[in-house]
Image (tube, rainbow, N blue to C red):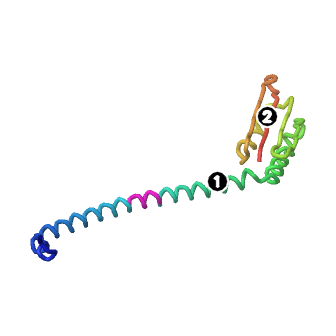
Amino acid sequence: MASGDECMKNVNPLHIITLLLVLFIFVTFELFKAKEELHKAKENFQETSVLTNKLKGLNKIYSDKEGVRRSIGTILKQYSLKSSNINQSIGKTSITITAESLDTLALNSLMSKILNGSYNLASLKIKKRSDTKASLHMEIKW
C-alpha cells in the first residue's frame, strides 16, 4: 500500500495545472452569467421605478376629488354652457353630468374641455335628438 507522499509524487503537475485552469474558466463563466442576470434585474428595477413614478403622478391627478369637482364646476359655469340646462350630481365616488336637450355647439364646447382635461371618464353616452340637439349622460370618477 502506498502512502500519501508516494501518491503525490506520481501526480503529474500538468494535471494539477489543467484542473486549476478548468476550475478558473468555470468560475469565470458563472460570474459572467451572474453579472448579466444582475444587469437585467437592474434594468427591470429601473423600468418598474419609472412606471411607479408615473402611476403616482396619475393617482394625484385622478384621485383629487376637490380638484375634479372645482374644475368641472368651472367648465359648467362657462357662458356658452349656462343656458344649456346641464344637471350635475355629485356622489361619493363620481360626478354625473346629464342634459336632455343640449345644443350641439354647447356639446362640442363641453366635450372639448372634458376630453382635453385629466378626468377619469367612467361612462359617456351621447344621443342625437335632432340636427342641432343631443342628450348627454357622463360619469366622471375620482
Q: Secondary structure at mark 2?
A: helix
Return the residue nearer the eye: 81 or 69: 69
Say if mark 2 contacts mark 1, CB within 8 Å: no
In this rendering, is residue 74 above or below 53?
A: above
**Horizontal relation, residue 90 to residue 110: left or right:** right
Residue at figure coordinates x 22%, y 63% from the top left = 22
Q: Position of residue 95 (x, y in %)?
A: 83, 43
Q: How many marks?
A: 2
Q: Residue furthest bottom?
A: 5
Mark in the foreground, 2 or 1: 1
Category of crowding for the residue at label 1, using alpha-carbon neighbours closer than 10 angstroms: few (below 14), some (14–19), many (at least 20): few
Q: Residue furthest front?
A: 1
Query: Which residue is disc 1 drawn over?
Result: 55
Residue at figure coordinates x 81%, y 26% from the top left = 132
Q: Position of residue 55 (x, y in %)?
A: 64, 53
Q: Residue furthest top?
A: 130
Q: Position of residue 89 (x, y in %)?
A: 88, 41
State how far apart marks 2 and 1 are (Cα): 35 Å
Return the residue nearer the eye: 46 or 109: 46
Number of the label disc, if any, that sits on residue 105: 2
Magenta part of the chain: 35-41
Type of the residue with mark 1: Leu
Type of the residue with mark 2: Leu
Q: Is residue 36 magenta?
A: yes
Residue at figure coordinates x 75%, y 44% from the top left = 113
Q: Is residue 136 magenta?
A: no
Q: Secondary structure at mark 1?
A: helix
Quadrant location of residue 107? Answer: top right
In this rendering, is residue 116 above or below 39?
A: above
